[in-house]
Image: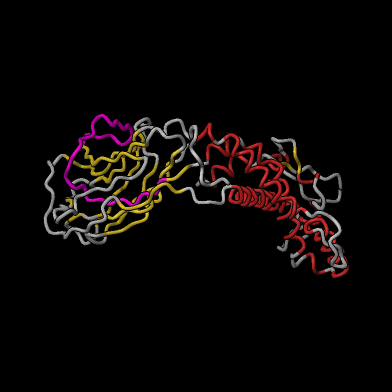
């Protein structure tokens, strides 16, 4: 798995677009879109034609200078979509290591845990193993608490032991004593702190009462092991300062803390991709050109001039698919070049993967 947004942010300026020399073209390519960290440009690849792309945009005021910002945003969004397309093709096999609930045996919600009155945070300490580039995601949580009101608002925090402030927070409105809510807290390998300990904590709002139910039926209190993670139940006193988090004040407990987590553990390729982003330059260049020009070929605005539209579409299809106006294959189209580049990129990544995932460890995403 990988964090698409972080990869898009890192790779967005790999390939640039030159400002066309045509003085009649009223749009200006902004500095971000012109920048090419790799030295590759979209306009080096036929049939890229910025004027045709600009003229294919179907909204009022397209010929106004005021639309340059919107057009540059459009170009940027297509580049980002193409980046996501490419990395999804390269890493196209499952990377999951483990997934499941901490507690799978249900227990009747009858008896309550009793904690000292100064305990105001319930949760878990989560420590990632020393295996390289392991990520995990807390997708959802089941909250089993007794409270006095018909609903109860709480904050759910995710802390890292090396960071003073929360790295994630989710407000949750508990509507029952068996409430499920999506959290989608993701920890990836792109920061130096990710190997520290993590703390998933529910804060009890002062002066409200929030008591966890006991898991005292048969094996209801048996907590499953999650591969690559060490997980312990913890509580914190009301002296915890969430703006200056200090994990030394955690208190281990064997009591139920009222939260059942659904956790997915995976091989995380985010850092590998970002640290080797220049390997992706060529295929991102090709994919972006194909995406942009196929949108031109199918746009309503281009089709308003039938003769010019047919000529433009024929040229695009020739370069993209290798098919001429008569339907004959007469050249190697870009759509045939992209799979070749993808396969070459997979081999390049495979040659460096041991440095990220350890000697002798096979990465199931790559063939």
282 left or right, relative to 224: right
The residue lying at 27 percent from left, 46 percent from top is 202
Give the quarter of the image for residue 126. top left
User: How was the colour assigned to the protein in this rendering?
Assistant: secondary structure
Give above or below for 51 relative to 267: below
- Residue 250 location in percent, x, y? 23, 34
29 left or right, relative to 175: right
The residue lying at 53 percent from left, 47 percent from top is 365
View extreme (front): residue: 360
- Residue 84 location in percent, x, y? 60, 50
Of 42 and 367, nearer the camera is 367
The residue lying at 48 percent from left, 42 percent from top is 268
- Residue 98 location in percent, x, y? 39, 48
Give the quarter of the image for residue 332. bottom right
Total numbered labels: 0
Determine if the magenta segment contains residue 251: yes
Give the quarter of the image for residue 235. top left
335 left or right, relative to 93: right
Determine if the magenta segment contains residue 266: no
- What segment is highlighted magenta in the picture? 238-265
Of 226 and 286, nearer the camera is 226
- Residue 14 location in percent, x, y? 67, 39
Give above or below for 115 relative to 301: above
The residue lying at 17 percent from left, 51 percent from top is 211
């Amino acid at each position: 798995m990988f964090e698409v947004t972080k990869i898009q942010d890192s790779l967005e300026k790999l390939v640039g677009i030159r400002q066309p020399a045509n003085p009649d073209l009223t749009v200006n390519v902004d500095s971000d879109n012109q920048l090419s960290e790799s030295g590759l440009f979209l306009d080096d690849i036929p049939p890229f034609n910025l004027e045709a792309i600009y003229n294919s945009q179907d909204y009022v005021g397209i010929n106004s200078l005021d639309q340059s910002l919107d057009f540059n945003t459009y170009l940027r969004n297509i580049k980002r979509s193409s980046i996501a397309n490419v990395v999804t093709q390269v890493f196209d096999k499952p990377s999951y290591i483990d997934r499941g609930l901490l507690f799978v045996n249900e227990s009747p919600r009858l008896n309550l845990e009793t904690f000292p009155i100064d305990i105001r945070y319930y949760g878990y300490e989560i420590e990632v193993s020393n295996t390289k580039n392991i990520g995990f995601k807390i997708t959802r949580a089941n909250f089993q608490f007794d409270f006095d009101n018909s609903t109860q608002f709480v904050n759910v925090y995710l802390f890292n032991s090396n960071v003073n402030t929360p790295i994630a927070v989710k407000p949750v409105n508990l509507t029952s004593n068996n409430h499920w809510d999506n959290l989608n807290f993701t920890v990836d390998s792109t920061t130096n702190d990710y190997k520290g300990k993590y703390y998933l904590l529910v804060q009890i709002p002062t002066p409200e009462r929030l008591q966890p139910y006991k898991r005292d039926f048969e094996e209801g209190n048996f907590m499953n092991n999650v591969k690559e993670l060490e997980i312990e139940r913890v509580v914190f006193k009301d002296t915890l300062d969430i703006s200056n988090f200090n994990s030394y004040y955690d208190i281990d407990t064997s009591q139920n803390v009222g939260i059942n987590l659904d956790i997915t553990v995976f091989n995380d390729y985010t850092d590998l991709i970002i640290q080797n982003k220049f390997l992706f330059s060529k295929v991102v260049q090709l994919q972006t050109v194909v995406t942009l020009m196929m949108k031109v070929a199918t746009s309503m605005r281009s089709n308003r001039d039938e003769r010019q539209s047919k000529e433009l579409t024929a040229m695009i299809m020739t370069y993209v698919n290798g098919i001429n106006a008569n339907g004959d294959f007469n050249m190697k189209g870009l759509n045939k070049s992209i799979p070749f580049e993808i396969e070459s990129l997979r081999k390049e990544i495979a040659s460096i993967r041991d440095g990220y995932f350890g000697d002798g460890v096979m990465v199931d995403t790559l063939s």
